[in-house]
């Protein structure tokens, strides 16, 4: 399997190259030249395997330059002992046909762990395969959860350093504390004055700056990325959409007319993984793209116009507060197969903050996706109602998905089985969840955790309980123009 750039398909590289480099030289994203299909027999075979063995098999479909031993090493390293459940992606049910896919049983209590526990293994293995002798520097811009999950994945991994930037006022207090208290010799964490898009643009600029690359090279280092622009982040996310299908079959569910999947979406990485799973043969009917008030994707899917010239809102689901969904570029490439067209759209986005896709793509997109959004109020109601109806506690991001699914049901009446991706533990956003339940409006994050546990009679996840005694290690704040200074400082160059 070769990987091509979305903006220049004449570039053709191995998966280890794509993973090591993160992004293509001319700014495009790496995509597989074709999406592999699984046969009936293969699905049957996968049905009886554990999550990590399913992961090995599915990842090998894309990362064909990895040996079986390499993949064994990566999957075992990631999925044995790092999750609080034997299945890293267990299902909870809200009534018969409504399945919640809980993707937050890892070390940072968010779905990013499913990919970021394995990425360091994939990346260091790729580095060896590419004969790279340089130290790998991971630059991360985070809207909250990626940062911590990447820090946990890469901490003390030999041959790597990781630098994380987060928007100073754009993450929850719990997320901030999780990151600022991070342990490890090779980690640095900085706050940025600005929003997530500022942090992401700043990081992209450094990442693609020739002079900076030379400076790193001189010092025996090279950049790579742990953001979902790296295909090594996406591939492991495909696994759980295949795995949940197999689990539903094993459970005896009737999937003869397929099932729907709802994904609370920000950078379009998670839902893109579901799209890959669908293309690989998982009988997914509609991919339901759920947004918060930053509903640029809702508008795009419904009108074909992507326009980031709009207000940016800081919401209670901060990991979805994004106006530039990087992975959309990959989906548009797969729908058009036309690299020149994609390069042109991205140029328009860069120059005018706006583009419109042609009717053919718009039609295809609307066949595959349904898109809607939840206001803050609707998000709070979804948390409240789900708890009172089912005794099920959902975080603010999952609640957006639940709320949008309700709208989908009302609009279409399509009640076939559904999988709702649950992307974070409610304890990561305790204050907002408490408020939604109408219990209290406490300012203290840890008091909120305690109250939530007492009131709902659920247990505080260990990684959150551990933060009670955490010491803040990182306190520096940088202007968005000055991120390079932070990088130089962190790397001592
Ligand atoms: C990252 C994140 C999202 C958004 O996922 P994308 O892949 O960026 O679309 C949603 N919910 C939570 C909790 C997240 O951490």
Image (tube, rainbow, N blue to C red):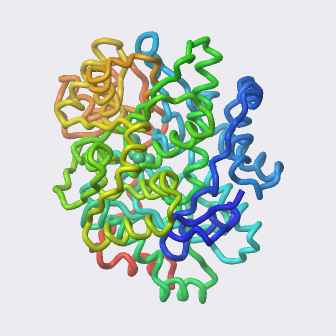
Give the quadrant of residue 122. Answer: bottom right
Whole-percent x, y for residue 209 in the image: 46, 82
Point 30% across, 66% down: residue? 198
Task: Identify the image quadrant of the N terminus.
Answer: bottom right
Q: Nearer the viewer, residue 105 or 402?
A: 402
Q: How many marks?
A: 0
From this view, report whether residue 482 is shown above or below residue 298: below
Quarter of the rendered image showing ligand 1: top left
Q: Residue at the location (24% across, 21% down)?
A: 384
The structure residue drawn at horizontal position 37% and vertical position 19%, both measured from the top left corner, is: 414
112 lies left or right of 475: right
Along the line of sight, the residue nearer the viewer: 93 or 98? 98
The reply to whether residue 468 is visible in this rendering is no
Tell me if I can see residue 280 in this picture. Answer: yes
Looking at the picture, does residue 3 appear above or below residue 35? below
Q: Say whether residue 155 is left or right of residue 298.
A: right
x%, y% of residue 216? 55, 83
Q: x and y percent of residue 40 in the render?
A: 72, 27
Q: Quadrant of residue 165?
A: bottom left
Left or right of residue 229: residue 360: left
The residue at the point 31 percent across, 59 percent down is: 196
48 vs 296, nearest the viewer: 296
| Figure quadrant of residue 353 | bottom left
Rendering coords of residue 134 (x, y %): 67, 77
Q: Is residue 149 above or below residue 442?
A: below
């Amino acid at each position: 399997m070769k990987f091509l750039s979305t903006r220049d398909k004449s570039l053709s590289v191995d998966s280890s190259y794509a993973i090591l480099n993160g992004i293509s030289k001319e700014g495009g994203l790496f995509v597989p030249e074709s999406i592999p299909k699984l046969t009936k027999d293969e699905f049957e075979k996968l049905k009886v395997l554990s999550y990590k063995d399913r992961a090995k098999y599915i990842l090998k479909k894309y990362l064909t330059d990895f040996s079986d031993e390499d993949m064994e090493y990566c999957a075992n390293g990631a999925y044995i002992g790092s999750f609080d459940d034997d299945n890293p992606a267990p299902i909870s049910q809200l009534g018969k046909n409504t399945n919640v896919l809980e993707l937050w049983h890892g070390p940072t209590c968010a779905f990013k762990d499913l990919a970021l526990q394995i990425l360091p293994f994939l990346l260091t293995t790729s580095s060896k395969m590419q004969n790279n002798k340089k130290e790998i520097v991971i630059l991360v811009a985070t809207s909250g959860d990626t940062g911590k999950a990447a820090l946990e994945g890469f901490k003390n991994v030999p041959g790597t350093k990781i630098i994380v930037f987060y928007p100073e006022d754009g993450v929850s207090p719990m997320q901030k504390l999780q990151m600022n208290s991070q342990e490890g010799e090779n980690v640095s964490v900085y706050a940025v004055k600005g929003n997530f898009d500022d942090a992401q643009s700043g990081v992209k600029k450094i990442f693609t700056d020739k002079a900076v690359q030379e400076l790193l090279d001189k010092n025996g280092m090279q950049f790579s990325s742990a953001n979902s622009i790296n295909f090594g982040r996406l591939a492991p996310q495909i696994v759980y959409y295949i795995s949940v299908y197999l689990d539903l079959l094993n459970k005896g569910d009737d999937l003869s007319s397929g099932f729907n999947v709802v994904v609370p979406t920000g950078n379009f990485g998670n839902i893109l993984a579901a799209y890959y799973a669908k293309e690989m043969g998982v009988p997914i009917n509609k991919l339901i793209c759920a947004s918060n008030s930053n509903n640029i994707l809702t508008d795009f899917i419904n009108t074909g116009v992507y326009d980031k010239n709009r207000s940016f809102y800081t919401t209670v689901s901060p990991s979805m507060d994004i106006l530039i969904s990087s992975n959309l570029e990959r989906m548009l490439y797969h729908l058009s197969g036309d690299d020149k067209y994609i390069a042109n759209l991205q140029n328009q986005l860069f120059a005018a903050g706006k583009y419109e896709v042609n009717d053919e793509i718009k039609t295809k997109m609307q066949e595959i996706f349904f898109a809607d959004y939840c206001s803050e109020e609707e998000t709070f109601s979804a948390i409240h109602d789900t708890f009172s109806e089912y005794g099920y506690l959902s975080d603010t991001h999952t609640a957006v998905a639940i709320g949008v699914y309700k709208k989908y049901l009302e609009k279409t009446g399509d009640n076939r089985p559904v999988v709702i991706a649950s992307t974070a533990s409610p304890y990561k956003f305790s204050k907002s969840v408490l408020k939604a339940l109408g219990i209290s409006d406490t300012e203290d994050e840890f008091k909120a955790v305690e109250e939530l546990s007492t009131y709902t009679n659920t247990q505080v996840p260990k990684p959150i309980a551990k933060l009670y005694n955490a010491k803040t290690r990182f306190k520096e704040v940088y202007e968005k123009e000055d991120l390079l200074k932070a990088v130089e400082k962190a790397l001592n160059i």
